[in-house]
Amino acid sequence: MQFLPELTLLGAGLIIFMVSLGKSNAATTKNIAIGLGAAVFGATLLSYCAEGKLFYGAYQVDLFSQVFKTLIAGAMLGVLILGHNLKGIAEKVHPEYYLFLFMSVLGLMMLVSSVELISIFVALELSSFAVYIMVPMRDDEGKFRFQMEAGIKYLLFGVTATGFMLFGMSYMYGLTGSTDLATIIAKYSTMWTHPAYVISMMMVLGGFFYKLAIFPFHFWVPDVYEGASNETTAFIATVPKLAATAILIRLISQISGDGQVMINVLLLCAVASMFYGNLSALVQKDVKRMLGFSGIAHAGFVLLGILTFQITGYANAMYYIIGYVLMNLACFLVLCNVSEKGENVMIEDLSGLHKRSPLMAFTLAVGLFALAGIPPFVGFMGKFMLLTGALKEGYLLVVILAAINTAIAIYYYLSVIRITYCSDPEERALVTPSTLTSATSVLLLLVIVFMGVSPQRFVDFASTAVQTIM
Amino acid sequence: MDQLLINPDYPHILSTLIFLPLAGAILLLFIRNEYFARYWALGVTCLTAILSIPLLRAFDMSTSKFQFVEQVSWIKSLNIQYVIGIDGISILLIMLTTLIMPLCVLASWTYIKTRVQAFMVCLLIMETAMLGVFCALDFVLFYVLWEAMLIPMYMLIGIWGGPRKIYASVKFFLYTLAGSVMLLVAIIWLYINNGYSFFIPDMMWQNYSSTAQIFLFLAFFLAFAIKVPMFPFHTWLPAAHVEAPTAGSVILASVLLKMGTYGFLRFAIPITPEATMTLAPAILWLSIAGIMYGGFTALAQNDMKKLIAYSSVGHMGFVTLGIFVLNTQGVEGAILQMINHGITTGALFLCIGMIYERTHSRELSDAMGLGKHMPIYATFLAFFSLSSFGFPGTNSFVGEFMIIAGTFEHSIVLALACIPGAVLAAAYMLRMLQKIIWGGTNNPDQSKMMDLNVREIVTLAPFLFFVFWIGLGAQPFIDLIHVSVENLLNNYHGITSQAVAVTELIIH
């Protein structure tokens, strides 16, 4: 029971591998993949209350990890549904694509439960390497090959970040003589003033900052978002961020005592992410690039929640990242549908979307307004609670800077909404979402509004989950 | 919670008013029929208006407490409540909103030809948000509605607006949002320094430090001055007004602008009285600048909507002037003038919209000499124009008179400085009126113009009724607001005289 979701994922990978050996048409593969995705989601729900330690204490199953696994499985199912046509991937490699997707998710799920340096490293690499392959799998019919550039960039930046992390881990081991997180943290909490401890921790965090795209580990974002197919980008923009937030909360929540140097550095990272992301997003023409930069800014907000070192702060960060994933799924759902053959969607391509498909236009508008932090959507509540938490800790300046960022960000979100609603289609084709897609988008809309209007139970729940790891 | 008064006879009246339009909007989402959408929106707004009448009857004029209070916990962990209630400052604004909305629906009856259903949904959501803003007694509730309102208003301008609608709508949205982000920080600061509560009445009349008050006041000022809009933050207004459809302009002029001045009265003065005292002179002179600037620019306009929009800048200058002289006459005059401006300017925008529907032009030169062919229209327009520059016997005269009287009490220099503004108002309104009714020797051919039909007369008549009611017998309206204003000013003078005494003590 404790390992059920991971086993299901492995099984799903095997089944898809079998499928890839034979010759199945795209529709069958798709249905199998969505079915398997649902099965994994079901498995996470089943093992929801499981608890315990596996693999000689390297693998911890608790409410916190199970909640995140459920979220990861849910987000994966969302990605599978919204990109179900896999327009941007050559048909003959569809099964392989799904195989790597499942493997990457397996890595992420393991990451959430890992409490030992080596297992963290293995899980992270498993999830990364699968995605390194997914990025260049895009089929642009031999035209530009910019997916190759994106793949190489993703790989190189990823390897660099991993290098940092491994270096940091070696320090950690050297300083404490253990690879077990609990032992390490116990030693660290008394030694925060030593530069070696701070630096090693920062370097380890760097590996996760890379996944979450926090300044200064964000450089891969725009090119990879642009170069990868829409479906892959939807995956990269959502699922790994959940796992990265989880492991960040797990690591940082253990830091106690006087970690002021760390806090200052992290605050700087958060603010720099916000400004860098928002200012760069202002001038983008490609919607995916824009969402990439906006993702950097949002990661800064998540970090702001984690930095409060309070249970409510972590719970807020959890709430925020869940909201972020939902909003992003809504946006990518529209992008994948608007894109006719899997090409990138420019902002002009959304012209008159309200006439071409009212539901898609509405979904996009709600998703973007929510990302911008306009009430009554989940983005506003998330930001509001994060800012409240940060101000309680006395970070007045940071809160003011974050508020200014909200004002900057609205411009680029609004310019997309403006194109969607206030311009004519000019002979662009109609967009006809399938029933499954429409149902998913309505569901996303409802959850985005509901979480925004009544956040209480979600935050309570998140607090309960966080308390299990404290 | 001694500031609250629960009226057991009307347990949920405010919630009903707030959520009825929203419910109507949600139902309307599922029905795709233009005719039905029009009648449905009219029905819902009329019902809201009728339901708001008992508020007036049951309103207790002898207390400054918040009445018709409803209180439910909303987000427990942050101590955010759904708490609403009204006092003398907000009741007239609530009535103005509920009564003006059916007329907005009527004004869009034939004006809006595309996506009628979506338009009506936006109007209804606007009504919910506007009523909520005036009722909210929890700062987060207030902020949520204050921001949420931007979306439907943005849509109203951006989808159904004129040729430069995109520029106008984006400018409107960005300006307002940028102004209110610091308000959010101020709200959180107040929450933390107030025993973790967002309850607005508890935030009032507290002794925050002078520095904190100055910063809070600046945050409030930025948000509210942009909404009013005060000179020099007014540049979004002409753009938004000109491009918005008639109903959008009416809502903008009649209700949205009032939220800024309402914010000053509800938040800036009670929460930061010391800062108000320190900064009031600057705001008074900004108001004068706004009055003069609005007047002169209005005088130079050939676009009728722009003319009215700039006249709004001038009129709202009078309102902020009245608020920040901080005496009974000034503040009461300001609140009355908020209502008057809502009535008169709303009606003028409707009048311009009616010409626009016929000629598809807002140019003054295209509308010259209409009086001969549209006598009923000319009559309405004449009364509203007279009212706009404060002709005795009309509503604005009372308001402006009270404001100027209050200003004289405060400072003669200021009062003298604002008098030319009143003269300017007469100049630009009479110029417009003269051109529309008589024009000159080179009038365009207006003989094919149809006079107002019954629907249009029905739309304008209530405005005219209130122009004269307030103009000839303003006492009932002043009675409604009097006690709350007295209470506000007494508290204010109590706190500031203390502060002044302390300062003198330190100096000597």
Image (tube, rainbow, N blue to C red):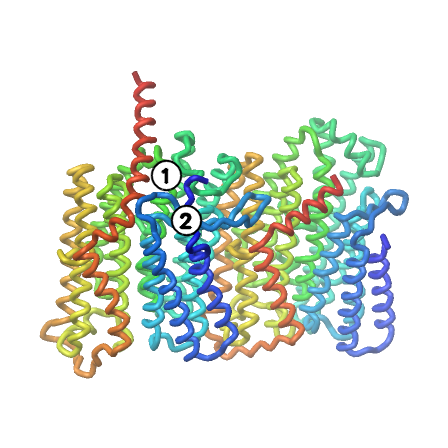
Q: Inspect the image, locate mark 2, and give the three-letter code of the amino acid beneath it.
A: Gly
Seen in the picture, residue B398 relative to B351 is either above or below; the reply is above
Give the Cα separation between the discs numbered 2 and 1.
Answer: 20 Å
Q: Nearer the viewer, residue B352 or B146?
A: B146
Q: Nearer the viewer, residue B66 or B211?
A: B66
Q: Mark 2, chain letter?
A: B
Label 2: state its secondary structure. helix
Q: Inspect the image, locate mark 1, and give the three-letter code of the amino acid beneath it.
A: Pro
Identify which residue is drawn at 19% across, 47% down.
B402
Seen in the picture, residue B120 relative to A264 is either above or below; the reply is below
From the image, tell me which residue sits under label 2: B179
- Work out which residue is located at the far bottom of the displayed protein and give it: B448
Seen in the picture, residue B451 relative to B56 is either above or below; the reply is below
Pick whichever of labels 2 and 1 is earlier in the sequence.
2
Identify which residue is drawn at 72% across, 48% down.
A246
Mark 2 vs mark 1, foreground winner is 1
Identify which residue is drawn at 39% across, 52% down.
B134
Q: Is residue A54 left or right of residue B326?
A: right
Label 1: state its secondary structure. helix
Badge 1 density bin: few <14, some 14–19, many ≥20, Cα 10 Å: many
Quadrant placement of the C terminus of chain B:
top left
Q: Is residue B83 left or right of residue B295?
A: right
Q: Nearer the viewer, residue B458 or B324?
A: B458
Expressed as whole percent of the image width and height from the top left, the position of residue B10 reads 42, 56
From the image, tell me which residue sits under label 1: B270
Q: Mark 1, chain letter?
A: B
- Work out which residue is located at the far left of the displayed protein and give it: B441
Expressed as whole percent of the image width and height from the top left, the position of residue B399 reads 21, 51
